[in-house]
Image (tube, rainbow, N blue to C red):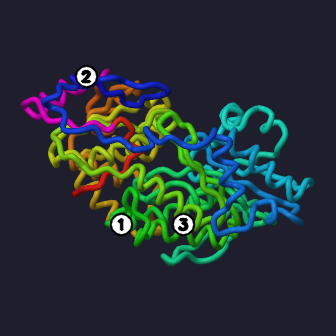
Amino acid sequence: MTKVDFLYGTGALTLDIPQDRLRGVLLSKAHDFKPEGTETDIVRRAIENPIGSPRLSEMARGKKNIVLLASDHTRPVPSKIMFPLMIEEIRRGNPDAQVTILISTGCHRSTTREELAAKFGREVVDAYPILIHDCDESEIVEVGTLPSGAELRINKTAIEADLLIAEGFIEPHFFAGFSGGRKSVFPGVTNRKSVMANHCAAFIDHPQSRTGVLEGNPIHKDMVDAARQANLAFIVNAVVDSSKKVIAAFAGHYDKAHLAGAAFVNDLAGVDAIEADIAITTNGGYPLDQNLYQAVKGMTAGEATCRQGGVIIMAARGEDGHGGEVFYDTFNNEKDLSRMMETFRAREAGDTIPDQWQSQIFARVLMWATVILVTEAPKEMVEALHMRHAGSLEDALKMADEILGRPGSITAIPDGVGVIVRKK
């Protein structure tokens, strides 16, 4: 037997896998990466040595209204480490600068005050003005046109900043290539219509709109241009390991620093697919496995290594339920996945509906393999989303063997959002 730990919630689920069934374990090299210095040392070093940009302290001189775009509660950004260092650097150049935090929620729900305190620390929440972007309700400014031809609209607070900066983290992203960088602006602080157009069916279907791919990715191209038009001046992005500890950081120009970070993550996270009958994967544990909507990300890692017609076992705690009403209703109300996919593809970019992109990718996964979900979400909810429900990894593996009609070969992915699975 080989014991494998699969990230789940704030801990892990352990499964003993028979050696003769285990084809391989796909792990990012980040798990073994040994950084130099403490997490604070790593971030400070990046801030003091920006890529393609003057230091933040120089850029802050004479600026009265500095706006920091910060990630929301769904992203494990180490803000307690990064924010004080960014403020320290700003104060070095401008002791009197007014700094406002704008939470880049995209189209996610609003972040609660308790979640903000957990993210930044209570002292930061009490000391700094914090605004939470709402893609439907925030005051939005029309900025320009994107390379795709779509109109770009951005939160007024971000556009009116004397200096717009952003924190974030870089990990593989299942259709934008990588998270971080330009995503703080788009979709972070844009309106819903702009996000819908960027996440349209044609772009999601594009062969370059995949994990770890930036070159030729139409979604990424629009995002970079949005950051340029918003005058995003400086970013600080971290790379974290499976325990959410900082192992690297990149600071400076919104695109150049991000590309350097993406190259680093690509080298660490890239793994070759090992085809098997069964792929067991996760959504990297908390915070990304809080709902079933987000869990689609980790499923795509399983999709890339599971043979067509096989079984993907997905472990996601899902304590917040489905995570998207439209997403849930799409699958609950339509049992024919082929017809669902045809409906998505027939829609023009401007007619994209909320969560369509997630539904489209999820439908693609479900059409590739049977998905068994190990979760705390209700069985009825899981089944309404066209998946099988299992209470444990052991039960899920028995179920998978029953579906296959035999003990299937297995590829294990302990952190499904932490790897870039490259098909051969």
Image position, residue 111 (x, y; %): 65, 40
**What residue did someone put label 2 on?**
16
Query: Is residue 357 in sight in this rendering?
Result: no
In the image, residue 5 sits, relative to residue 133, either above or below, namely above
Q: Secondary structure at mark 2?
A: strand
Q: How far apart in space, not on screen, are marks 3 and 2 (Cα)?
A: 42 Å
In the image, 89 versus 303, the foreground residue is: 89
**What residue did someone put label 3 on?**
223
Label 3 vs 1, first from the N-terminus = 1
Query: Is residue 29 in sight in this rendering?
Result: yes
Label 1 vs 2, first from the N-terminus = 2
**10 Å crowding of disc 1: few (<14), some (14-19), many (20+):** many
| Residue furthest to the front | 36
- Mark 3 belongs to which amino acid? Met
Span of residues in magenta: 392-413
**What residue did someone put label 1 on?**
208
Q: Nearer the viewer, mark 1 or mark 2?
A: 2
Q: Secondary structure at mark 1?
A: loop
Q: How far apart in space, not on screen, are marks 3 and 1 (Cα)?
A: 15 Å
- Mark 2 belongs to which amino acid? Asp
| Residue furthest to the left | 405
Q: Nearer the viewer, mark 3 or mark 2?
A: 2
